[in-house]
Amino acid sequence: MLTLSMFSIPVVNFSTLHHFTLKLLTIRSFVLISFILIPFISVAQCFKGNTAVGPGEYLSYDVSYQVGPVWTNIALVTLSAVKEMQGTKEVLHMKLNARTYPTYDHLFKVRDSYESWVTLQTWQPVKFQRYTVHDENTVLLTQYFYPAQSMFYYNYKLNNEPVDKGQGNIGQCMSDMVCSLYYPRTLEVENLRPGTPIPISVLYNNDPTALKLVSQGKGIIETRDGKRYHCSKFVVKMNSTVSMFKENSDMIVWFTADKNKIPVYVEAQLKVGTVKIYLKESKGLLNPMTAWLNKP
């Protein structure tokens, strides 16, 4: 059984401030990769129906990093889903927001927002929007999807520079960055044999990346707030294109072994240390949380 223990926030030695800031830069990228690359779009499996994700769901995660001998929370990631109308289409509007905690804003302030709109019945992508503020740079990226034509169009704006417009191809089972986080929860992965590989094709910043997800059976995760969950374990096999990770390392993901399939715990080794992401709060779930073993 894996236990995540509670630790206090350390005082950072200012002689190592620059080095620590560089680490936070890498962690910022990891936060985005973890909640975008871990969620996968399988070439072999297309959408067959959704019984796991519903409007009103809200999830939050703490991102923890090791500073010396101590683990500390440096950022918060939240995920939410609501039902809306896009023209005549009923859509699921999914949001991912990431921000550093105030203690670390003076080192490297993160305020990132990612949003996705998909048709509620088919989960075909309709629109994607990214708004990020990174030091002095502000990025706004908007994508519009036309699955019937296997095309998407985008507008990209950096600071006050002219808008860059373009287009690209989208595969039959591909989706945008946020939708791809929710999509694997709709797949039938509960009864996979340990060692079963799932091919992964992720559309990340308009570039396809080939990875592999491998089932590792089931186990029990105990989070730092004392909650114990029955989970399914998966390993994401990294490759050289994902350069921030330690060479030959794998990313480990634990999903609740129930109908919700919520990510509970993520761990990965970076080139500059180890990061852990764990579930902090869950509300508005579509199904009862039967994987919570010590529920009062």
Image: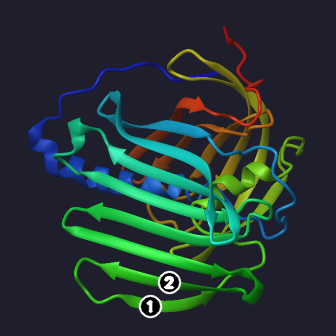
Q: CA distance from mark 1 to mark 2?
A: 6 Å
Of residues 108 and 124, the one drawn nearer to the viewer in this rendering: 124
- The residue indicated by pointer 1 is 165
Please tell me which residue is depicted at 43% across the width and 50% down the height of the picture. 97
Asked whether the residues under the numbered discs 1 and 2 touch, taking CB atoms below 8 Å apart as contact, a structural biologist would say yes
Residue at the far top in the pictured view: 296
The answer to whether residue 5 is left or right of residue 102 is: right
Of residues 199 and 102, the one drawn nearer to the viewer in this rendering: 102
Give, as a three-letter code, the residue at label 2: Tyr
> How far across and how far down the image is residue 73, in percent?
36, 33
Please tell me which residue is depicted at 29% across the width and 62% down the height of the picture. 133
Residue at the far left in the pictured view: 15
Of residues 272 and 155, the one drawn nearer to the viewer in this rendering: 155
Mark seen at residue 90: none
Mark seen at residue 154: 2
> How far across and how far down the image is residue 34, in percent?
53, 52
The answer to whether residue 180 is left or right of residue 113 is: right
Give, as a three-letter code, the residue at label 1: Lys
The answer to whether residue 283 is left or right of residue 113 is: right
